Amino acid sequence: TLARVRDELAERLAVASGDRAAITPSSC
C-alpha cells in the first residue's frame, strides 16, 4: 500500500539523517 511505502521512505530518510531514535518500533 502507499502508506507502507511512505513509511518505508520516511524510515530510510530518518536513518540517512542519523535520527534512528526518531524511528519508533511500532511498525514491528
Image (cartoon, rainbow, N blue to C red):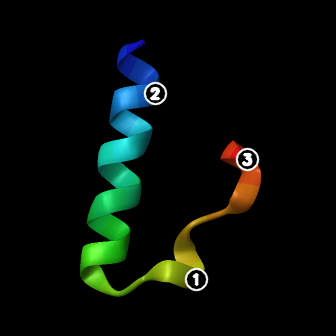
Residue pictured at 42% horizontal, 83% vertical: 19
Tags 1 and 3 touching, CB below 8 Å: no
| Left or right placement of residue 27 versus residue 18 in this view | right
In the rendered structure, which disc, 3 or 2, sits on the residue that comes first in sequence?
2
Residue 22: percent from left, percent from top: 54, 74
State the separation of the CA atoms marked 1 and 2.
20 Å
Residue situated in front as seen by the camera: 28 or 14? 28
Q: Which type of secondary structure does the marked residue at label 2 adopt?
A: helix
Residue under numbered circle 3: 28
Graded by Cα atoms within 10 Å as few (under 14), some (14 to 19) or many (20 or more), the crowding at tag 2 reads: few
State the separation of the CA atoms marked 1 and 3.
15 Å
Graded by Cα atoms within 10 Å as few (under 14), some (14 to 19) or many (20 or more), the crowding at tag 3 reads: few
Graded by Cα atoms within 10 Å as few (under 14), some (14 to 19) or many (20 or more), the crowding at tag 1 reads: few
Residue under numbered circle 2: 4
Residue under numbered circle 1: 21
Name the kind of residue labelled 2 in the image: Arg
Residue 21 to residue 5: above or below = below
Residue pictured at 42% horizontal, 12% vertical: 1
